[in-house]
Amino acid sequence: MRIRLRPRAVRLRRALAAGAVLVLLVPAYGCRVDVTAPGAPTPWPPASARHWQWQWQVTGRLDTDVDADVFLLDPVRTTTAETSVLRARDRRLVCQVYVGSVVPDDPDASRFPAGVLGAAGRRPQSRWLDVRRWDALEPALADRFRLCRGKGFGAVALADADAYLHRSGFPVSFDDQLLFNRRLARLARSLSLSPGLMNDVPQVAALAPDFDFAVNEECVRLGQCAKLLPFVDAGKPVFHVEYTGSTADFCVTTVGYGFASARKQRTLDAWRETCPLL
């Protein structure tokens, strides 16, 4: 025979159960490190801008034990279990998102219409996207950002955000790219993600106010480091990497500028050599 509880008894039982859950959870949360919550944009305190150590890994098995404050990772390869481990150690997680190109193996490749696919891009088999077609690109790019947020990232670094510098197959102008990149920064913020500009050095002066940090490859080799100073002057971090040369040589320049610098292999596996902090 089933015994039916009166509504008051049911409410009391639910209240007691909820109270028991809170009793169990509050001490646990009280003992955890105060890290940025999933879906909250990563903060970059200006006072710390010159003191970050960072790691950029998008190939090989992720080494979560690397002594770094900031990790730049691939959103598809990285698992929520890995981001949970890093977040529990108070690491800041940046998601590398390709916003200006697509490859056939991308899980969302079919979402980009044929009309927005241009010439061969930087990556093998990749195609540049027509960044003038915001209406066609925004839905898929927004979901790329949402994937980052869902996996526990608090920031996004925009890769291939410089189609105007390449033979993309489209007449993309300097101003077209500026508009596209600013739209992406606003989109990231609307999804509670901190936006970062990757490379695109000629537009740094114009875009530094729109972005929270910069990621740069080889500014020493290319003689472009001084052009990144608008980020430094604004108290925003610059995460820099060189693939050739000795840290004993290029660190003098980049640490002097206030960058977080490291030497990496072009494969961007776990190996790195860091520059000393100021």
Image (cartoon, grey):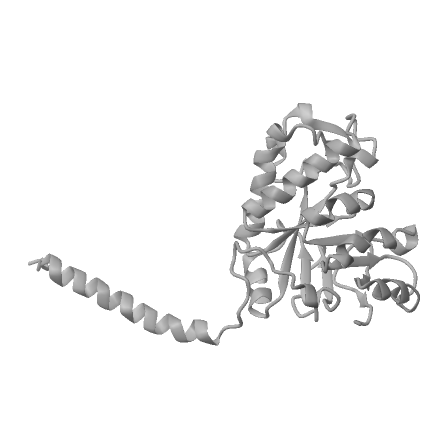
Q: Residue at x 59, y 70 (%)?
A: 89
Residue 213 is drawn in which quadrant?
Answer: bottom right
Eyeballing the image, is 195 above or below 143?
below
Res 127 visible = no
Q: Residue at x 74, y 35 (%)?
A: 177
| Residue 31 position in % (x across, y down) | 47, 76
| Residue 13 position in % (x across, y down) | 19, 65
Q: Residue furthest top?
A: 115
Q: Nearer the viewer, residue 272 or 29?
A: 29
Eyeballing the image, is 4 above or below 29?
above
Count of marks overlaid on the render: 0
Q: State the quadrant of the N terminus.
A: bottom left
- Is 219 positioned to the left or the right of 17 in the image? right
Res 69 visible = yes
| Residue 162 position in % (x across, y down) | 77, 39
| Residue 51 position in % (x across, y down) | 73, 69
Q: Residue at x 85, y 51 (%)?
A: 227
Eyeballing the image, is 171 above or below 257?
above
Q: Nearer the viewer, residue 33 or 178?
A: 178
Residue 26 is drawn in which quadrant?
Answer: bottom left
- Is 163 positioned to the left or the right of 81 in the image? right
Q: State the quadrant of the C terminus.
A: bottom right
